Amino acid sequence: MITSTAEIMNRGMECLTESLGAVDAERFISLIIRERFDYTKWQQTYFDEMSPGAFHQNALEYAKTHPYTGAAERL
């Protein structure tokens, strides 16, 4: 399924607004635009500074709170 740019932007704004509220969602977007934010570099720095044990623990906690509900097929 191909998602249009408008759909992605709309869903992204919905997520931000639900999570942060309207005002902080707008602040978040303005900060990213103003700072020329590079999400990939930010994630790399974030994970590089995390110990392997902390990464593992975070992954386990995430898996518990976000169980896979898809219909994957083993190939």
Image: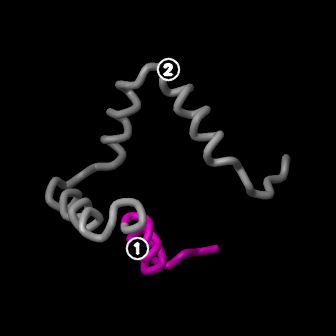
- Image coordinates of residue 23 in percent, x first then y, are 24, 68
Question: Residue sitting at 49 percent across and 79 percent down?
Answer: 4
Query: On the picture, is 32 further left or further right than 65?
Result: left
Give the overall secondary structure of the magenta segment. helix
Instruction: Check contact, mark 2 vs mark 1: CB within 8 A.
Output: no
The residue type indicated by label 1 comes to: Met
- Image coordinates of residue 56 in percent, x first then y, are 56, 26
Sequence-wise first label, 2 or 1: 1
Q: In terms of depth relative to the viewer, which is nearer, 33 or 64? A: 64
Task: Check residue 52 in the rendering and tell me which mark sits there, or answer none.
Answer: 2
> Quick one: SS at disc 1?
helix
Q: Quadrant of the N terminus?
A: bottom right
Q: Which residue is mark 1?
A: 9
The residue type indicated by label 2 comes to: Pro
Magenta region includes residue 11: yes
Question: Residue sitting at 37 percent across and 40 percent down?
Answer: 43
Q: CA distance from mark 2 to mark 1?
A: 34 Å
The image quarter containing residue 49 is: top left
- Image coordinates of residue 53 in percent, x first then y, are 51, 19
Question: Residue sitting at 38 percent across and 71 percent down?
Answer: 13
Task: Check residue 19 in the rendering and tell me which mark sits there, or answer none.
Answer: none
The image quarter containing residue 33 is: bottom left
- Image coordinates of residue 51 in percent, x first then y, are 44, 20
